[in-house]
Image (cartoon, grey):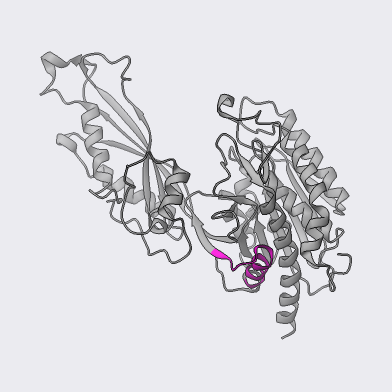
Amino acid sequence: MADPQDPQDPQAAADRLMDGLRADLERLAAIPSIAFPGFPPEPVREAHDLLVGLLRDAGVAHIETIELPDTAPVIFGEIPPPTPDAPTVLLYSHYDVQPPGDERLWDSPPFEPTPIEGGLRARGIADDKSNVIAHLGMLRAFDGRPPVGVKIVFEGQEEYGSPFDTYPPTDPERFACDAMVIADLGNVRPGTPTLTTGLRGAAEVIVEVRTLKEPRHSGEFGGAAPDALLVLLKALATLHDVHGDVAVEGLRRDEWTGAGFTEDEFRDLAGVEAGLPLLGSGTLGERLWSGPAITVIGIDAPSVDHAASAVVPYARAKLNLRFHPRQDPHEARAALVDHLSALKPFGVPLTVTPGDTGPGYEAATDGPAYRAARAALATAWGTEASYIATGGSIPLVNGLAQAAPHAEVLLFGAQDNQCNLHAPNERVLLSELRATVVAMCAFVTGYAADFTREGRS
């Protein structure tokens, strides 16, 4: 695609590139680039160096490494706009991966990319190395001269959490752009092109109870001595109503009007045991994306295997709250803290400690980048794009949005909700990778044309 005004068919370009892209994906996925404490840093640097070389080969002349304290290196690359009235698109993905977990649960070694029907299996091959390669595919399709300016951000510590999440607003000129493609997501299901338009926010709260100086014999004291674990359980039971819906006042819940899972799809994805009901009422979209969720993610209490016949003097739980993309994070966390602080189960007060919180995000979808993205995804997958949200959070999205507040934020990529990200036997489908390359090519072409027309009108 040497001439950005007369590009080749993006389908043909993707077909021409796929063998090389697959080979590079296998090379990248074979590197155990885990940026968690306790893992060697050398593989993370190896993945960084491989990508720098691949970017140079794809025609990116300006490449820097952003070195921040306590995080892995961030690759930053830049291609200037071809004309003064062309837009600039920022491309984001990350090259670090989750640890593999229990390798006995894998059907093949997690860092030996293995062919499967229609795709490849390896840790991190979907999340997020497939999307790194999709960005590279677009650059190769245009011989490094796309019809838009490009800024590239390949992060090296997204999975563990990084100071880079809050860095972009401190250097807004570097990240200034007209649109950004955050490729750390994918389709609601294989073959269904999907734009993610909302991310729920997240907060943590710890609640604890102390009732006795030390354990006391349950036969001699049980029935009158206040049991800390019973107090805690009674408090936790107030967080949901009889249907399983969150019962905390002040947490926002709206109707969900976008696409979503069928109940059978969700049961399969979540691994729900046969015959069990799902929690809550209303649509799955409301329960998963446009409404709150409270999960008890940990409890400190005596273990069953080592339990003594004694009244428990102390118990503690950690709660994870997910809330509406547009709700203020401090307001949401305060709603949960206030609910728990007002309780005195059996007359016993609780100690409630607010933890970390992070905002959600909801994208505006009425600009030229979204018009171009909808058309590009339809070109790539042969059907109209759907909108979904996600219950997970990507903190960097807010950091980049603050650095470039007028930029349109697009979230799509080569993953899909059946790819087993963060789980054993993670996989990517080559059809999804190919379609993402097609979509990226069609997007920058359509966006450049639409942006230029708007500028001249």
Quadrant housing residue 212: top left
State whether residue 338 appears in this view. Answer: yes
Above or below 441: residue 306:
above
**Magenta includes 379?**
yes
In the rendered image, the quadrant that contains the C terminus is: bottom right
Extreme residue toward the bottom, this view: 457
Extreme residue toward the front, this view: 117
Above or below 235: residue 338:
below
Q: Residue at x 56, y 49 (%)?
A: 395
Q: Residue at x 58, y 60 (%)?
A: 192
* Residue 227 image position (x, y, % from top left): 19, 25
| Left or right, residue 217 beside residue 328 | left
* Residue 420 image position (x, y, % from top left): 56, 41
Above or below 115: residue 287:
below
Q: Nearer the viewer, residue 401 or 419?
A: 419
Quadrant housing residue 47: top right
Q: Nearer the viewer, residue 310 or 445?
A: 445
**Magenta includes 315?**
no
Number of on-image labels: 0
Dominant SS of magenta comes to helix
Q: Nearer the viewer, residue 175 or 388?
A: 388
* Residue 342 image position (x, y, % from top left): 23, 45
Q: Which residues are magenta?
A: 371-386
